[in-house]
Image: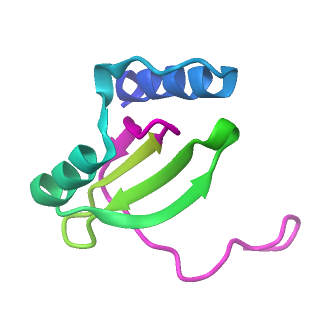
Amino acid sequence: MLRRLIPGLAVLALIAGGAQAQPGNCAPREVVVDRLATAYGETRQSMGLGAQGAVMEVFASQTSGSWTITVTLPDGLTCLIASGRVFEAMAAPLPKPGSDA
């Protein structure tokens, strides 16, 4: 798992630093989204706006439990950051810090 996470962290570091990510784990967004849907049954579950206009998205399959985190750069290049199994959507927010969970 750590070997899969390290390249993703490198991409995040590049994005945070303002440099362009290398296309080793990257492709146009349409290609990545189509591949996640057809090969893994994953759909977008959440998203957020990062530094320098990058968009972070979480894709997951409710059926298989697989999940993938991507970052899309302003130029449309989408990079795979991390992936795994046993995705679980959380219905309730996390408890406030200091409260018993």
Whether residue 93 is in magenta: the answer is yes
The answer to whether 9 is drawn above or below residue 90 in the figure is above
Q: Quadrant of residue 66?
A: bottom left
Overall secondary structure of the magenta section: loop
Residue 51: image x %, image y %?
Answer: 69, 39
Residue 5: image x %, image y %?
Answer: 43, 29
Looking at the figure, which quarter contains the N terminus?
top left
Q: Residue at x 27, y 72 (%)?
A: 62
The answer to whether 58 is drawn above or below residue 7 in the figure is below
Which of 14 and 81 lies nearest the eye of the viewer?
14
Q: What residue range appears in magenta? A: 72-101
The answer to whether 19 is drawn above or below residue 87 in the figure is above
Q: Quadrant of residue 7?
A: top left
Q: Residue at x 43, y 56 (%)?
A: 58
Question: In the drawing, does residue 98 fall left or right of residue 28?
Answer: right
Whether residue 39 is in magenta: the answer is no
Question: In the drawing, does residue 82 fall left or right of residue 92?
Answer: left
Which of 17 and 64 lies nearest the eye of the viewer?
17
Residue at far bottom of view:
91
Residue at far right of view:
98
Question: In the drawing, does residue 62 fall left or right of residue 76?
Answer: left
The answer to whether 17 is drawn above or below residue 41 in the figure is above
Which of 29 and 56 lies nearest the eye of the viewer?
29
Question: In the drawing, does residue 31 fall left or right of residue 50?
Answer: left
Looking at the figure, which quarter contains the C terminus?
bottom right
Residue at far left of view:
39
Q: Residue at x 19, y 54 (%)?
A: 34
| Total numbered labels placed on residues in the image | 0
Colour basis: rainbow
Q: Residue at x 42, y 44 (%)?
A: 70
Residue 56: image x %, image y %?
Answer: 52, 49
Residue 20: image x %, image y %?
Answer: 51, 20
